[in-house]
Image: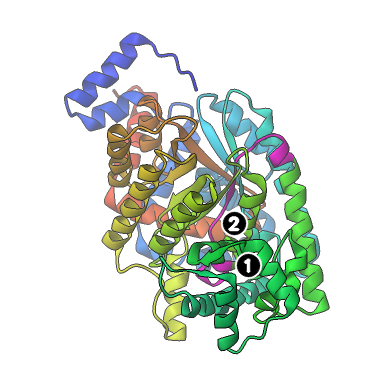
Amino acid sequence: MIRIYNFAYFSVLQSHKKNGNVIDYYKSLRIHKNKTFTSLVNNLILNQALKLDVVVDNGPQIINSLYYVFGKRLATNIINQTIGKVFCAGENIESVERKILEQPNMNFILDFCSEAMDGIEDQTKFFDENCQTFRETSILCSKFKSQNVVLAVKISSLIEKELLMKITQARNEQLRLFRKILSNNQESISVQDFVERVQNNGILLTKQDVDQLNQMFEDSINQISLLYKIQPIYMYDVELNQNTLVKKFLTLNKQEQQQFHSFVQRIDAIMEPTYLNKTTMWVDAEQSYLQLAIDSFSQQMESKYNKEDTIVLNTFQNYLKSTGDRIDYEIEKAKQFGLPICAKMVRGAYIVEETKLSKEKNTDSPINDGFDATTQMYERNIKLLIQNAQNIKSNIFVASHNEETVNYVKELLQKSPLPPPSGVKFAQLYGLSDHLTYQLLDEGYNIYKLLPFGRTEIMIPYLMRRAQEAKKMLQSNGMQTVLLWDEIRYRLHLK
């Protein structure tokens, strides 16, 4: 994106930074200058409220109380005018388009915040309506030529949650078998040896199974090719769903088969304009008990649509202990099959739910042991991605509100700038870390804001996660509050 500066203004900004006066530098950006006075006050009050554990930790109960006391219509309006106004772009595509037009120098990710929910009476209708909204959002992304606008999709808004869980379980069982057969990452065996090892584990393969394996692997099999080419269920190469290595672990009844077929049709409907217009699409990460299925779908979509451009990106939550292995696999897969590296790197959004679930089931938590461990995981993985992006076409998003993490990535890029068309983009959520967003924009980095939108009743899970994230950020860094106060004082002619 080409940006034209007023030279004197730019000089002032650089002077502030060189003199180390960080607060004055951020104040000089006036990042909240386009907000109305009412929005400033609302944002400030909400920031103060979200610092309080009692408010954030009891968020769902507060929301339920609003609906109980005021009724659906008034409660919805209250939510929309308070927390919704800070963290969301509105309820429909038209409101999103207005937000984009208001900030012509910013890139955006459009996130229709619909996901797996309990209590939906007509799930098919729910999924079909979500599909239509994602498709319309993809078309909207292509309308903006001077800005980069990305589509974000949540898989659980398009397929039954129970089916996702079943496919994830099947993938888990597949992976346990694969680890027994090929325990060494470097080991490579013939298809014949692989067949023998499978059968030694009590799984009898038919001649058709073996013929399919010979077609898939040609000469030899290693751990990377095994994980890449054998899926728990196939979206596109549907004849492979009759292979014993699929059927052994996943048996679907007729209703589930139809549900999966409908899901693939919905993905095709979204990808048709997305691929045609070369729009980048994020596949959002979700809870760990759904993620292996989502990873499989994302991988199959990448194989189909990323042959010429980096269209489909998967998301990696670095608060998970398993993410290091997943990034290692992504890099080796790219090297072995000549694929681009496509990754959105986040800390993770489901820590409260994941921790609670592991305690209830008395199982080991999938979450890293503390904030510092997650930071180490994030930095380790992003360093590997950037190092390998020197020689592999890549599309990497650093989605972070943590200033130390962002500065770490900037240092990596200064030491090892990436050759085009590869590159690293930064992203922050709408309503969070605006000072960091505009600093990156001022410094010339490729920066995006994620714009969530949707009906209030389906936005509530998203809003609760944002409240948790905002609490941590606001408790550790008061810059957002300082800059809101400064803009209010400016409007009141008090400075």
Considering every residue shown, the one lying at the far left of the view is 19
At label 1, the amino acid type is: Gln
Residue 102, compared with residue 301, is above or below; it is: above
User: Front-most of 86 and 125?
Assistant: 125
Relative image position of residue 333 (x, y in whole percent): 50, 55
Left or right, residue 450 beside residue 12: right
User: Front-most of 222 and 285?
Assistant: 222
Relative image position of residue 234 (x, y in whole percent): 70, 64
Q: Quadrant of the C terminus?
A: top left
Q: Earlier in the sequence, mark 1 or mark 2?
A: 1
At label 2, the amino acid type is: Gln
Q: Which mark is residue 160?
A: none
Question: Mark 2 highlights which residue?
Answer: 299
The residue at 52%/55% (across/down) is 463
Secondary element at tag 1: loop
Left or right, residue 115 beside residue 428: right
Magenta stretch holds residue 283: yes
The residue at 40%/14% (across/down) is 5
Secondary element at tag 2: helix
All told, the count of numbered labels is: 2
Relative image position of residue 334 (x, y in whole percent): 50, 50
The residue at 74%/61% (across/down) is 237
Identify the magenta region: 273-292
Relative image position of residue 235 (x, y in whole percent): 72, 61
Question: Mark 1 highlights which residue?
Answer: 231
